[in-house]
């Protein structure tokens, strides 16, 4: 998202078996998995906030929502 902001890099979010709002709000199954990742890597508060902001911004972009039913 930093490159999107600074140099206009195109970002194409793909939401695979996750709701866009869960990514935007870091809630539901996505939120639980995200918290687990943060604990596993011992992320600093600064890194966590940076990732949360990036996820929120990315989830506000238009993207593709894919489910297993498309296979």
Image (tube, rainbow, N blue to C red):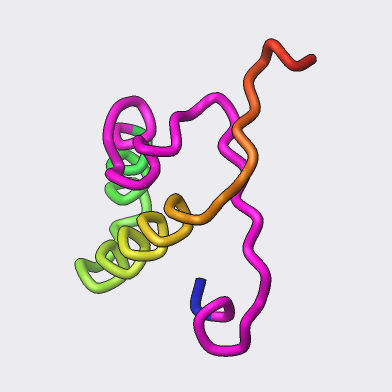
Q: Residue furthest bottom?
A: 6
Q: Residue furthest left?
A: 45
The quadrant in which the C terminus is found is top right
Q: Residue furthest top?
A: 69
Q: Is residue 45 above or below residue 35?
A: below
Q: Residue furthest front?
A: 62
The quadrant in which residue 22 appears is: top left
For image coordinates 75% across by 16% down, the residue present is: 70
On screen, residue 70 versus residue 27, left or right, reads: right
The quadrant in which residue 26 appears is: top left
Q: Is residue 50 above or below residue 7?
A: above
Q: Is residue 31 above or below residue 29?
A: below
Coordinates of residue 28 in the picture (x, y in percent): 29, 27
Seen from the viewer's position, the closer of residues 46 and 23 is: 23
On screen, residue 42 versus residue 1, left or right, reads: left
Coordinates of residue 9 in the picture (x, y in percent): 66, 77
For image coordinates 44% across by 30% down, the residue present is: 19
Query: Would you say residue 9 sits in the magenta stretch?
Result: yes
Q: How many marks?
A: 0
For image coordinates 53% across by 88% down, the residue present is: 6
On screen, residue 19 versus residue 42, left or right, reads: right
Coordinates of residue 33 in the picture (x, y in percent): 37, 34
On screen, residue 55 versus residue 7, left or right, reads: left
Query: Would you say residue 64 sits in the magenta stretch?
Result: no
Q: Which residues are magenta?
A: 3-32
């Amino acid at each position: 998202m930093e490159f999107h902001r600074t140099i206009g890099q195109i970002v194409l979010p793909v939401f695979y078996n996750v709701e866009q709002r869960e990514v935007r709000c870091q809630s539901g199954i996505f939120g639980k998995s995200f918290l687990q990742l943060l604990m596993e890597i011992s992320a600093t508060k600064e890194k966590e906030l940076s990732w949360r902001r990036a996820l929120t911004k990315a989830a506000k972009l238009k993207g593709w929502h894919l489910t297993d039913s498309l296979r």
